[in-house]
Image (cartoon, grey):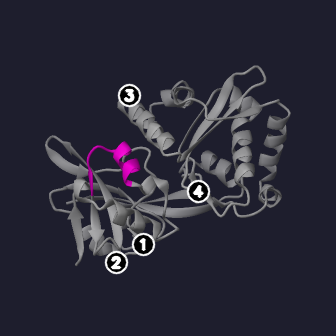
Amino acid sequence: MSIRWVKRNEIDEAKWNACVASRPETASVCAKLWYLDACCEHWDALVEDDYRAVMPLFRRKKFGIPYLYPPFFVAQLGVLGLPLRPMEKWLHAIPGRFLRADLLFNACNDLSFVPERHRITHHTCLLPLNRPYADLRQAYSHNHCRNLKKAESAGLRILRDADTESVIRLFRNTRGRQQNVGYAAGDYRRLENLIRCLRERKALEVWSVETPDGQLCAAAFFPTDGHRHTFLFSGRNAESDTNRAMFFLMDQFIQAHAGENALLDFNGSNNEAVAKFYLGFGAQKQAFAQVRLRW
């Protein structure tokens, strides 16, 4: 057997899930079939041998020409499992009918052979949670500790399981108005459907922060499989800049999960200020590649 193209409706779910789970470094709820279905209507996969490794590929058409793209709300995927064949073989296995491909890989996929003009390096930030909270807190930056003291003095209150619409509204009314965000109305509907799927499977934590007068000022969605918590989406208002609500939210999340054999995946950012926020909690950068090809 070799690397072959498998249509979505022909994928063996049990074998897919076993394959994804076989490599803890890349295993995530974001690689489950139902999660991918919620993020993209049209996708298929490359499968190596009898599901030793898999690679989901998301497809669209523009002017009748099919191409591959990375949908919103999907964390780094790429080749999952324990591949035997080198990454060159995976790229060559992509059907020739796709004249353009924009692909996100994971940190375990070595794409160094791809010319730099076709490759972009991104970073995520990871925090192992398998230590007592006191030890995790000790690794916070001095600036984060100062911001937390300010947040703790503001009388903020943590809520669990805020409603989906309120969290998305926080984002849409602030950062969502910026042109570089790129979310259309359909993307927000897709996010709502994804959150509904996660809730149904009890694979989601929703954390939010209220001011003393009961106003929602920050909130976030964390898909989880118990071993990896992913900081998927968040919203906050202008007041959170003053009361440091997001510092408070993240610290409380870390405190709640301290001691677990799990990772907090901040889901990365190429924005220096956002990355500094993540790294200030003691997280470490991890590089992964995006590859853009034309045939």
**As rendered, which of 157 and 17 lies closer to the eye?**
17
Element marked by disc 3: helix
Rendered view: 188 above or below 253: above
The tag on residue 86 is 2
Q: Is residue 73 left or right of residue 40?
A: right
Image quadrant in which you'd find residue 227: bottom right
Q: Residue at x 54, y 55 (%)?
A: 225
- Work out whether mark 2 precedes mark 3 in sequence or the reverse, and give the earlier one: 2
Rendered view: 282 above or below 153: below
Q: Nearer the viewer, mark 3 or mark 4?
A: 4
- Work out whether mark 3 precedes mark 4 in sequence or the reverse, and give the earlier one: 3
Q: Quadrant of the N terminus?
A: bottom left
Labels 2 & 1 near each other (Cβ < 8 A): yes
* Mark 3, residue position: 185
- Count residues near mark 3 (Cα–Cα under 10 Å), then give few for <14, some for 14-19, many for 20+: few
Was residue 41 drawn as part of the magenta stretch in this picture? Answer: yes
**What's the distance in space between the residues labelled 2 and 1, CA to CA?**
8 Å
Element marked by disc 1: loop
**As rendered, which of 125 and 188 lies closer to the eye?**
188
Q: Is residue 236 left or right of residue 2?
A: right
Q: Residue at x 59, y 52 (%)?
A: 266
* Mark 4, residue position: 226
Element marked by disc 4: loop
Please indicate, yes or no, whether residue 93 appears anywhere in the rendered image.
no
**What's the distance in space between the residues labelled 4 and 2, CA to CA?**
30 Å
Q: Is residue 16 left or right of residue 207?
A: left
- Work out whether mark 2 precedes mark 1 in sequence or the reverse, and give the earlier one: 2
Where does the image place residue 6, in percent across and percent down from the top left? 22, 62
In the image, which residues are magenta? 33-44
